[in-house]
Image (spheres, grey):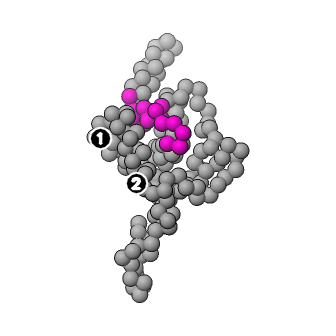
Amino acid sequence: MQAEMLSIVAKQAQDMRGMWQVRALEAARGKLGMVLLSVLAHSYDDAMPVLLRVAFPGYIEPALPCLVTAARISKTGAVVADVVDRDGFKHLRTPLYPNEMMLRDEFRRLADRLKLNDADRVEMFKAVQRWVVADMRLDPTMDPKDPDAKRLVH
């Protein structure tokens, strides 16, 4: 009975290894790996423990440095998030990418490297889009005299 259960679990883990989330976790390194982990945690919070154990057997917790917030676009257009460094210190609004195009391009290269199909690409980029929770740039079309005008782009 126990051997049967282990066989079922092993098959499910093997099936999960084909998911884009697990394949991306296995492929991403450095800053992209840190960002991807935060993107996935933001969109797939409940599934993360399982995804991480499938991608990294023996996984316990993220290695430092790691992101501790979702991303924001700063007033300058940079993609920023809070980072905990190797010593455990938290750095607020650390620039990750100079602009959102560089973030997009890095994930596009990852999707190309993984040879993701269209549906998986769309799902991945929707997760990245959800991860950017605020855009602090001023709306260039805003009329300052209009009391109902929104000051932020998004």
Q: Earlier in the sequence, mark 2 or mark 1?
A: 2
State the SS at label 1: helix
Tell me if residue 50 can be seen: no
Closer-to-camera residue (54/110): 110
Name the quadrant of the C terminus. bottom left
Which residue sits at x=70%, y=46%? 88
Disc number placed over residue 101 in the picture, else none: 2
Which residue sits at x=47%, y=46%? 39
Magenta highlight range? 18-32
- Report the residue marked by disc 1: 119
Which residue sits at x=29%, y=36%? 117
Q: CA distance from mark 2 to mark 1?
A: 21 Å
As drawn, 58 above or below 1? below
Closer-to-camera residue (22/96): 96
Q: What is the x, y in percent for residue 40?
A: 47, 43
Q: For residue 28: magenta?
A: yes
Q: What is the x, y in percent for residue 59?
A: 58, 30
Which residue sits at x=42%, y=20%? 11
State the SS at label 2: helix
Q: What is the x, y in percent for residue 45?
A: 50, 44
The secondary structure making up most of the magenta span is helix
As drawn, 143 above or below 3? below
